[in-house]
Image (tube, coloured by chain):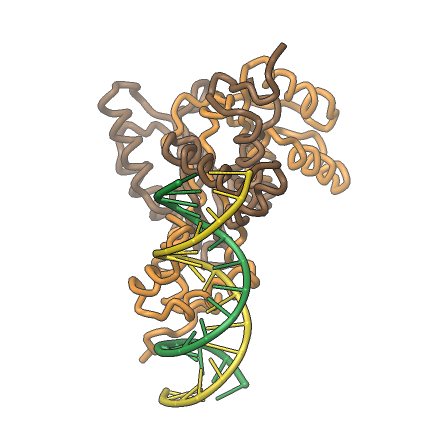
Chain colours: A orange, B brown, C yellow, D green
DNA sequence: GTTGAAAATAAACATGG
DNA sequence: CCATGTTTATTTTCAAC
């Protein structure tokens, strides 16, 4: 028999998960309303949120801005293939990708490709300039494949919170 | 000569952009502090934020949760190739991808591939189950390529706000 | 931009598991 | 001892001017 609020391996009980589910949708929800929904006092909700922030479960609290509305209508997915997986070269590439503001997201992946980047730019020529900086200038980049996004069907950071082990 | 706060095509002046830059990093920043940084009163900041929310420039306010800390240590990039671009079939695929909670992000792209998905799962067998549901079950999916993420180098929704046309 | 009321956040305290 | 709820203080949000 398992207690109703038993902690999973992550140290989160079902109250924490319920709170997270709400904050992932709207982190401006007052603690009082969250409390009503999860059946805790506002103070308890407050303490749990602070703890999860301190623990890094909540990595940040951010406004999500529509790129198209701030002059960056183009989203591009880039698959980058590198020559050598030498650690120093790899780290150099990671660093240069991470530092580029046009690069929203960067993943180092197994399989065919080596990196997958999600890039936001104003124009194709801005993208071209970015490729020069990030790829042509880096001799460790063997090739890259450009996938222009026609439709951003789903763009969120939300993580499913049901069925947490 | 252009006024210092001239609106770009998006209707945002440099104050709005400065506010957005802050909110993209931390949307819990008090309006009073934002005001100090951008040299506006807290009330002016408040009104601008509300307007940008109403206009959809700010699409949402969310807590960013670390997937690894809530039982989903695996991130996977999936490239999906479809058979037919018939509109009804395409829409069906889009809908099924968007509705799956494991799918954080879904992009419809030009070029070689047709869709790029960013998926978060607890285990490989959960991913396998997802592929059965989303890909094998959908006869319009020709093939898909799985890229397992080894390192999430950068994962944000932040949009660069300098040099806005 | 300033002021003032309403509301939310955050701390302090006492209590039960 | 840790987490909860209640109370109190502080800070922030938000509307009016």
Estimate the x, y position of residue B30 in percent, counting from the top left. Answer: 53, 49
**Is B138 in front, or is B36?**
B36
Left or right of A134 in this view: C3: left
Which residue is at a point 51% across and 56% down the rendered structure image?
A58
**Is D3 in front, or is A126?**
D3
Which residue is at a point 59% across and 17% down the rendered structure image?
B3
Estimate the x, y position of residue A129 in percent, counting from the top left. Answer: 65, 17
Quarter of the rendering containing residue A44: bottom left
Estimate the x, y position of residue A76 in percent, counting from the top left. Answer: 51, 24
Tell me how many marks there are: 0
Quarter placement of the N terminus of chain B: top right
Left or right of B33 in this view: B55: left
Compared with residue A92, is residue B71 higher up or lower down, i.e. above or below? below
Estimate the x, y position of residue B38 in percent, counting from the top left. Answer: 61, 36
Quarter placement of the C terminus of chain B: top right
Compared with residue A38, is residue A81 higher up or lower down, i.e. above or below? above
């Amino acid at each position: 028999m398992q207690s109703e609020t038993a902690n999973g391996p992550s140290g989160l009980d079902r109250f924490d998960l319920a709170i997270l589910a709400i904050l992932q949708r709207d982190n401006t929800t007052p603690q009082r309303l969250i409390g009503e929904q999860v059946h805790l006092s506002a103070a308890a909700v407050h303490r749990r949120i602070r703890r999860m922030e301190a623990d890094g479960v909540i990595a940040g609290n951010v406004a999500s801005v529509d790129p198209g509305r701030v002059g960056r209508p183009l989203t591009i997915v880039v698959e980058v293939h590198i020559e050598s997986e030498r650690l120093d070269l790899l780290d150099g590439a990671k660093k240069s990708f991470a530092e580029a503001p046009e690069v929203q997201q960067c993943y180092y992946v197994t399989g065919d490709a080596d990196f997958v980047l999600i890039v936001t730019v104003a124009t194709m020529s801005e993208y071209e300039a970015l490729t020069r900086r990030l790829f042509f200038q880096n001799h460790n980049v063997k090739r890259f494949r450009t996938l222009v996004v026609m439709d951003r069907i789903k763009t969120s950071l939300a993580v499913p919170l049901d069925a947490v082990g």
